[in-house]
Image: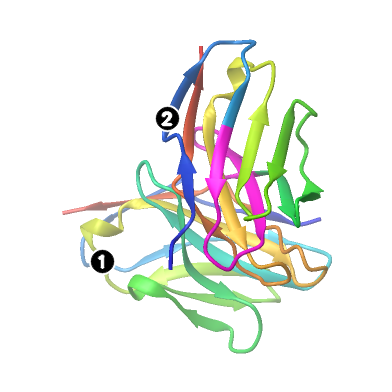
Amino acid sequence: ETGVTQSPTHLIKTRGQQVTLRCSSQSGHNTVSWYQQALGQGPQFIFQYYREEENGRGNFPPRFSGLQFPNYSSELNVNALELDDSALYLCASSSQGTDTQYFGPGTRLTVL
Amino acid sequence: AQSVTQLDSQVPVFEEAPVELRCNYSSSVSVYLFWYVQYPNQGLQLLLKYLSGSTLVKGINGFEAEFNKSQTSFHLRKPSVHISDTAEYFCAVSGASGGSYIPTFGRGTSLIVHP
């Protein structure tokens, strides 16, 4: 069974740029959630995708957007990057209606 | 809405000593409770979860937690820690209905095990 994978591992961008992060969900899972984890903080929920549609959103501005593909993999896009967007971005997959999410290793984004 | 408070930001302990990491939650609905561990530069790994039934939950790596509804707590314990337990530990709560089960995380407790 393949776990959740994310790419890239690390990324450095400058303020104002755009970034795309990718996630492959665990085999058999149809739901993907994205989290932002700032340094020294717990993960904060960004949004969740199920059947290629957004299925819940946290308190993040519209410049955070996402996609889910037919194979249940997902992308997180962030436009107009700000310094405060520097964080570890975590992807988690699950089966819709089940209680547990399984996390990937994360993408460390640094905005200069 | 749910919230989680992890009362200790850092817990130093000597190897082979017992440890308790504290977690309190608030919610207006029935909840599921989770503990995750995060090793340096890695994602989160599920340690254990409480869904229903027995209030004492056993997880991986010798950890256990006890759900106390009256005190709205879900403290994590281990009777004897190892150096390898040094990591960040996160308590999380989600609603027990609705289907999406999106967890709300605490700020984390850094467990530091000294030799």
Decide: few, some or many residues near mark 2? Use Cα within 10 Å; few <14, some 14-19, many ≥20: few
Q: Residue furthest bottom?
A: B53
Question: Does dot 1 land on a helix, a strand or a loop?
Answer: loop
Q: Chain of mark 1?
A: B
- Tell me the amino acid under the disc marked 1: Ala
| For residue A20, above or below residue A79 | below
What residue is drawn where x is 64% and y is 55%? A72
Specify whether disc 1 shares its chain with disc 2.
Answer: no
Q: Quadrant of the N terminus of chain A?
A: bottom left
Decide: few, some or many residues near mark 1? Use Cα within 10 Å; few <14, some 14-19, many ≥20: few
| For residue A32, above or below residue B100 | above
Asked if residue A31 is among those painted magenta in the image, a careful observer would answer yes
- Tell me the amino acid under the disc marked 2: His
Numbered circle sitting on residue B17:
1
What residue is drawn where x is 68% and y is 72%? A98
Tag nearer the camera, 1 or 2: 2
> Closer to the camera, A55 or B34?
A55
The magenta-colored residue range is A21-44
How does the figure colour the protein chain or chains?
A: rainbow
Q: Chain of mark 2?
A: A
Q: Position of residue A10 (x, y in %)?
A: 42, 30
What residue is drawn where x is 59% and y is 89%? B54
> Closer to the camera, B29 or A77?
A77
What residue is shown with label 2? A10
What residue is drawn where x is 55% and y is 45%? A23
Q: CA distance from mark 1 to mark 2?
A: 36 Å
